[in-house]
Image (spheres, grey):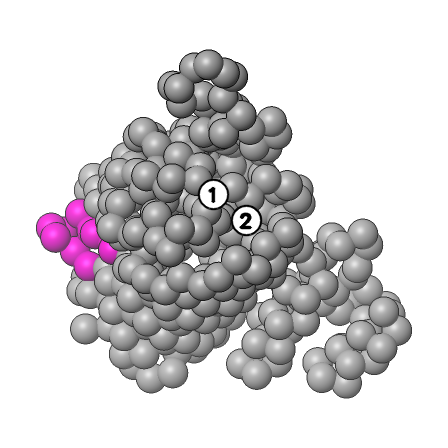
Amino acid sequence: MGALVFVLKNVFRTDFLTGRGVIFHTEKTVFFNILPFCQMKLYQTALLFIILTGIVSAQCSDAGVCSIHKQSALKKKGAVYSAGYSLGLSEDNNRLTFHTFHLGAEGYIFADTRYSINIPIHSITGALGSVIGLGDIVGIITVRPPKSDISFSGGVRLATGNDDKEGLPQQYQPGLGTNDLLLGLSYTKQKFVFAAGYQKSSGRSKNRLTELKRGDDLLLRMTYSDQFDESRDYAISLLYINHLTEMNAVSFMTPAPSSAKFYVNVNGSDQKQLNLLLQAGWVLDKDTRMVIEGAFPFFKREINLDGLSRAFTLATSIHFAY
């Protein structure tokens, strides 16, 4: 820990010992002061995110519901296209490594109606093998009536990704195997956004080893966003995710002499989650913006049958406005 403080003090030139700094470390929980964070240069903040994601157990448990009322890159009536990359590691026995490339788009259909779409491509490697392929595409429509602080969202997560590739279990698969419905509601008050989302999962995956049924998710989100100056902005979000039911999977311990399939609930797989999300953005020119994101969980998710849990996550993206 002393070596870490020494590095941070020399990189960020901040007096961490007097409490004016960015990081305090107690049992893998990280607290920070947002003002010094906003004053950092691009390379300083990028390095901070790398250091933090090595200290805490960051995870992403997003089956699609976290895309509802996510911080938008749109600043005016128009369209924004994005390309991004994220790196993740899991803490389960498979020690999975996730490389994900994202292609995205946001724009306006009508004056008060906008769309967003995200297309992921996954490369997943673990003790049992590797899989590369298209993931599940998420599309969302958001409507905000004129002169209203309330917006409504609806969308889908389409089962475009393979969920039974290379004979590997669900954790290795680029797709979840179900077409899910996404619904959301948000209220905007100045620089705050308060939102709720619901994901209705349908059926089971076709993965022969698990035939996983995930259940529905409830999301509560609070976001604060602001600009430090004309070229730098940030957003801070708290996300509460409630897995409403336990996951259910096929059991190969079928009681004889029955030949029918036997399904069991996975104990503890309905664990609730509370995550802190940080986003920092820089305007590179009038039409281009760079974003770095990090996630810091308060609760560790033990069950990773669906492959959505992460022990380490770091993401960056470039946004192009037209």
Residue 3 lies, in percent from the top left, at 85, 77
Identity of the residue furthest to the left in this view: 110
Task: Give the magenta range.
Answer: 107-117
Along the horizontal axis of the image, is 171 left or right of 260? right
Residue 38 belongs to the span the image colors magenta: no
Q: Where does the image place residue 158, in percent across and percent down from the top left? A: 25, 45
- In the rendered image, the quadrant that contains the C terminus is bottom left
Q: Which residue in the structure is indicated by mark 1?
A: 306
Q: Kindly report the distance in space between the C-alpha atoms of the residues bearing marks 2 and 1.
A: 8 Å
Examine the rendering and report whether any part of residue 19 can be seen: yes
Identify residue for label 2: 309
Q: Secondary structure at mark 1?
A: loop
Residue visible at 56% across and 32% down?
Answer: 269
Residue depth check, mark 2 versus mark 1: number of the one nearer the observer: 1
Q: Is 115 a magenta residue? A: yes
Label 2–label 1 contact, CB within 8 A: yes
Q: With respect to residue 258, does 6 lie above or below?
A: below
